[in-house]
């Protein structure tokens, strides 16, 4: 259906994959909501939440999904929209073909309807220690300075909002694979670049040199194409391949300069 047709009928047609419980049966339900210029997918879901009635007039339960900032910053509202993983807050109805099909991301376990459990990704971030190791909460003063050129590209990596879209798009992330995914790998590069984060650089590199790490990446490059923030994920993975090769020799020869 074209945008002109939508304006004519003043309604938006949606088909939503529903699932009441984890591992429960799934079903498709059809909804029709009033059209409003400039509305996004979240707007349509909010209407359905307040008026949970299907197209054929059947009363149903409100659709469950996650959201927070509504500004493409928190990453909570990720779902599969017309076959493409993306943020529902920044996806405009006028840019979509109808009926609009909404599904949960399949990479993560479904909690209910469009809400998924992204613990797999958060656990991967813990595995690679995606933080700056500071001992204590006292005032440490200004930290070490970074060259402006390095700070600028490091900022691009820091835009990651752990939305999970890159992991959904990656064919190597699945229930049968232990691959930690592109987002945690990119964070390894980010924190290894930080002057203070580099203190445990070798620990992060060793964490991605084993099972589920870099070797499991198939270089499909789906992740960088799907990332809503345009983060150069494949560039980070290529850089980490070089860094882990150096780390491998350091481990073998027992270098005294494990962190530099």
Image (tube, rainbow, N blue to C red):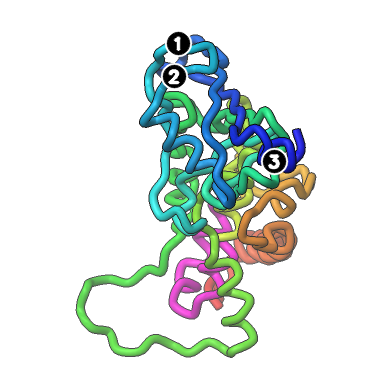
Along the line of sight, which residue is nearer the eye, 98 or 238? 98
CA gap, disc 3 and disc 1: 26 Å
Residue at x-position 76% and y-position 38%:
2
Task: Name the spot of residue 38 as percent of width and height, x first.
Answer: 58, 52
Judged left or right of residue 59, residue 155 is right
Q: Residues within 10 Å of mark 3 (few under 14, many from 20)?
A: some
- The answer to whether mark 2 and mark 1 are in CB contact below 8 A is yes
Per the rendered image, the range of residues in magenta is 188-207
Taking 108 as reference, is 192 above or below it?
Answer: below
Taking 73 as reference, is 92 above or below it?
Answer: above
| Mark 1 secondary-structure assignment | loop
Taking 141 as reference, is 82 above or below it?
Answer: above
Q: Nearer the viewer, mark 3 or mark 2?
A: 2
Residue at x-position 46% and y-position 67%:
200
Residue at x-position 77% and y-position 49%:
221
Q: Name the disc covering residue 58, or none.
A: 1
Q: Residues within 10 Å of mark 1 (few under 14, many from 20)?
A: few
Along the line of sight, which residue is nearer the eye, 169 or 52? 52
- Dot 2 or dot 1: first in sequence order is 2
CA gap, disc 2 and disc 1: 5 Å
On the question of residue 172 being in view, the answer is no
On the question of residue 200 being in view, the answer is yes
Task: Name the spot of residue 120 as percent of width and height, x first.
Answer: 48, 38
Please give the residue where the numbered disc 3 appears in the rendered image.
96
Please give the residue where the numbered disc 2 appears in the rendered image.
53
């Amino acid at each position: 259906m074209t945008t002109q047709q939508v304006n004519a009928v003043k309604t938006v047609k949606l088909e939503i994959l529903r699932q009441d419980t984890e591992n429960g049966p799934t079903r498709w339900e059809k909804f029709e909501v009033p059209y409003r210029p400039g509305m996004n997918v979240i707007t349509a879901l909010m209407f359905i939440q307040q008026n949970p009635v299907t197209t054929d007039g059947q009363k149903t339960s409100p659709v469950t999904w996650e959201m927070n900032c509504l500004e493409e910053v928190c990453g909570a509202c990720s779902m599969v929209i017309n076959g493409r993983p993306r943020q529902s807050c920044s996806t405009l109805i006028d840019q979509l073909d109808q009926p609009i099909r909404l599904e949960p991301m399949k990479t993560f376990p479904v909690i209910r309807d469009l809400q998924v459990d992204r613990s797999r990704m958060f656990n991967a971030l813990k595995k690679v220690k995606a933080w700056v190791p500071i001992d204590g909460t006292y005032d440490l003063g200004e930290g070490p300075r970074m060259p402006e050129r390095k700070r600028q590209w490091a900022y691009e990596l820091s835009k990651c909002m752990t939305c999970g879209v890159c992991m959904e798009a990656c064919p190597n992330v699945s229930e049968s694979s232990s691959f930690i995914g592109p987002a945690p790998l990119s964070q390894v590069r980010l924190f290894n670049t930080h002057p203070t984060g580099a203190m445990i650089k070798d620990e992060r590199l060793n964490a991605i040199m084993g099972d589920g790490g870099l070797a499991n990446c198939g270089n499909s490059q789906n992740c960088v194409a799907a990332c809503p923030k345009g983060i150069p994920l494949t560039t980070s993975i290529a850089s980490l391949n070089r860094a882990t090769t150096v780390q491998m020799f350091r481990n073998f020869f027992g270098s005294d300069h494990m962190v530099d």
